[in-house]
């Protein structure tokens, strides 16, 4: 997987024009069949504290399909450089019927491109099929920081509602350097910004940062223990990086048919929100 990061980091990006962005939704489209691995899923569940490995964690197949997403971003027709992309948002809408004991064909393609105040935001959509049935659907939204404004594009907006300021404390989460490296090994996400202070500094970070999909997965696991997800959609909006080591507090509140939550630094005097999320 590190080779894919290097390939994507050094690739020459395609020109960004209105026609090239419009064409992204037609091609490229990449697919790959992933073989079942009960052992791998159990390792993932242990890392993210998912207590019932007979049920599907919403983020698992998106993690398994990371290499496919990297290949898409590294494609010669992609105008987006992987290194430097910022993960803005993640949503998973179908996952409950997906199984880990049979092969899954994952398909990755580009979705909508948005104009963001700091550049361009692009959707990468992953869908999964097992035995001819669609069982998985997830979308990650990524920011490429640029001053380019290639024609009229829809404005990027996040409609995820954060919990209220008086929301109760749900759990405390901690992330050590060794935990983050273990997650990198199991997930395959070996982006250098996660591996050590030295490699993170090469890309402008003062220390290694926690994977957003790791902290998000642990938060979802906590909330599932309180009230089973029951196939509800899960969404995250990332706000700022979490530096290793880290201690954070998860807040949540129940809305009408949905749960709103946020992960906030444990330093109450200078509290920072790492992400907000919504279930349902």
Image: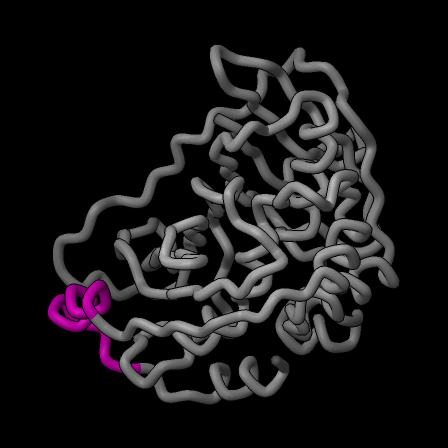
* Horizontal side of residue 25 vs 3, given as left or right: left
Coordinates of residue 62 in the picture (x, y in percent): 53, 57
Q: Is residue 126 visible?
A: no
Q: Nearer the viewer, residue 131 or 235?
A: 131
Could you tell me which residue is drawn at 51 percent across and 55 percent down? 87
Q: Nearer the viewer, residue 117 or 70?
A: 70
* Horizontal side of residue 51 vs 34, given as left or right: right
Could you tell me which residue is drawn at 31 percent across and 76 percent down? 78
Coordinates of residue 134 in the picture (x, y in percent): 38, 51
The part of the image, by quadrant, that contains residue 182 is: bottom right
Q: How is the image coloured?
A: one colour
Answer above or below: position of 183 versus 17.
above
Could you tell me which residue is drawn at 36 percent across and 58 percent down? 132
Coordinates of residue 149 in the picture (x, y in percent): 21, 61
* Horizontal side of residue 220 vs 114, given as left or right: right
The part of the image, by quadrant, that contains residue 274 is: top right
The part of the image, by quadrant, that contains residue 124 is: bottom left
Answer above or below: position of 189 versus 43.
below
Answer above or below: position of 164 versus 21.
above
Residue range highlighted in magenta: 14-26
* The N terminus lies in quadrant: bottom right
Could you tell me which residue is drawn at 59 percent across and 87 percent down? 3
Q: Nearer the viewer, residue 222 or 20?
A: 222
* Horizontal side of residue 158 vs 218, given as left or right: left
Is 130 magenta? The answer is: no
Is 17 magenta? The answer is: yes
Could you tell me how many numbered marks the image carries?
0
Answer above or below: position of 45 versus 80.
above
Q: Is residue 172 visible?
A: yes
């Amino acid at each position: 997987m590190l080779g894919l990061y290097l390939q994507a980091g050094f690739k020459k990006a395609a020109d960004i024009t209105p026609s090239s962005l419009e064409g992204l939704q037609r091609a490229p489209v990449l697919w790959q069949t992933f073989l079942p691995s009960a052992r791998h899923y159990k390792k993932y569940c242990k890392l993210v504290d998912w207590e019932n490995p007979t049920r599907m964690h919403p983020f698992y197949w998106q993690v398994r399909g990371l290499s496919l997403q990297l290949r898409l971003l590294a494609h010669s027709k992609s105008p987006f450089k992987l290194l430097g992309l910022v993960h803005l948002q993640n949503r998973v809408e179908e996952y409950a019927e997906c199984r880990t004991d049979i092969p899954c064909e994952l398909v990755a393609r580009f979705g909508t491109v948005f104009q963001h105040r700091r550049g361009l935001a692009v959707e990468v959509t992953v869908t999964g099929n097992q035995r001819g049935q669609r069982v998985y659907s997830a979308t990650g939204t990524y920011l490429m920081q640029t001053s380019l404004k290639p024609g009229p594009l829809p404005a990027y907006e996040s409609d995820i509602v954060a919990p209220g300021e008086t929301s109760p404390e749900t759990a405390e989460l901690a992330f050590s350097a060794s935990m983050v490296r273990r997650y990198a090994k199991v997930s395959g996400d070996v982006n250098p910004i996660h591996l050590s202070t030295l490699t993170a500094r090469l890309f402008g970070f003062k220390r290694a940062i926690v994977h957003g999909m790791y902290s998000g997965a642990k938060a979802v696991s906590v909330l599932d223990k309180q009230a089973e997800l029951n196939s509800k959609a899960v969404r995250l909006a990332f706000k700022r990086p979490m530096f290793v080591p880290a201690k954070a507090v998860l807040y949540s509140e129940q809305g009408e048919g949905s749960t709103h939550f946020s992960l906030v630094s444990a330093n109450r005097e200078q509290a920072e929100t790492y992400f907000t999320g919504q279930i349902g």
